Image (cartoon, rainbow, N blue to C red):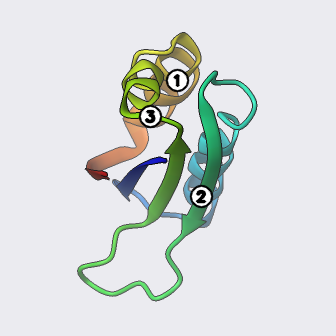
Amino acid sequence: MFTHIVFFKLKEPTKENLKFVEQTLLSMDGNIEGLKELEVGIDVIRKERSFDVGIIARFDSKENCLAYDVNEFHVEKVKKVVGPYLECTKSLDF
């Protein structure tokens, strides 16, 4: 199993923006070949060092994760859609 974790910091973390980003990220479930498990969460502690939204995505292999990164649905319907809402992202892959 290969795990891909991403943290998102929004420019304007309003309730509406958080929900929109969450729903957009959740739309990947069932639409990306090789994506086995997907969890999306909105931060509830809200500390200074906290990110606003996070995902945990699981794949059978590193190669499936790399294919997901350039998958048309991921690029066109997720990255391009949420990109304007984001201040920064950080990821961890293992």
* Location of residue 10 in the rendering, given as x and y in whole percent from the top left corner: 38, 55
Query: Label 2's element?
Result: strand
**Comparing labels 1 and 3, the label whose residue is closer to the camera:** 3
Provide the residue designation for mark 2: 40
Label 1 crowding class (10 Å Cα cut-off): few <14, some 14-19, many 20+?
Answer: many
Q: Is residue 75 left or right of residue 62?
A: right
From the viewer's side, name the closer residue of 70 and 33: 33
Q: Measured along the vertical axis of the image, is residue 66 above or below residue 7?
A: above
Disc 2 and disc 3 in contact, CB within 8 angstroms: no
Give the mark, 2 or 1, whose residue is nearer the N terminus. Answer: 2
* Location of residue 56 in the rendering, given as x and y in whole percent from the top left corner: 50, 56
The amino acid type of the residue labelled 3 equals Ser
**Comparing labels 2 and 3, the label whose residue is closer to the camera:** 3
Q: Residue at x 31, y 51 (%)?
A: 94
Task: Name the image quarter holding residue 63.
Answer: top left
Give the mark, 1 or 3, whose residue is nearer the N terminus. Answer: 3
Distance from Cα at disc 1 to Cα at disc 3:
17 Å
* Location of residue 54 in the rendering, given as x and y in whole percent from the top left corner: 46, 60
**Which residue appears farthest toward the top when viewing the image?**
72
Provide the residue designation for mark 1: 74
Provide the residue designation for mark 3: 61
The amino acid type of the residue labelled 1 equals His
Query: Label 3's element?
Result: loop
Q: Residue at x 46, y 88 (%)?
A: 45
Label 2 crowding class (10 Å Cα cut-off): few <14, some 14-19, many 20+?
Answer: some
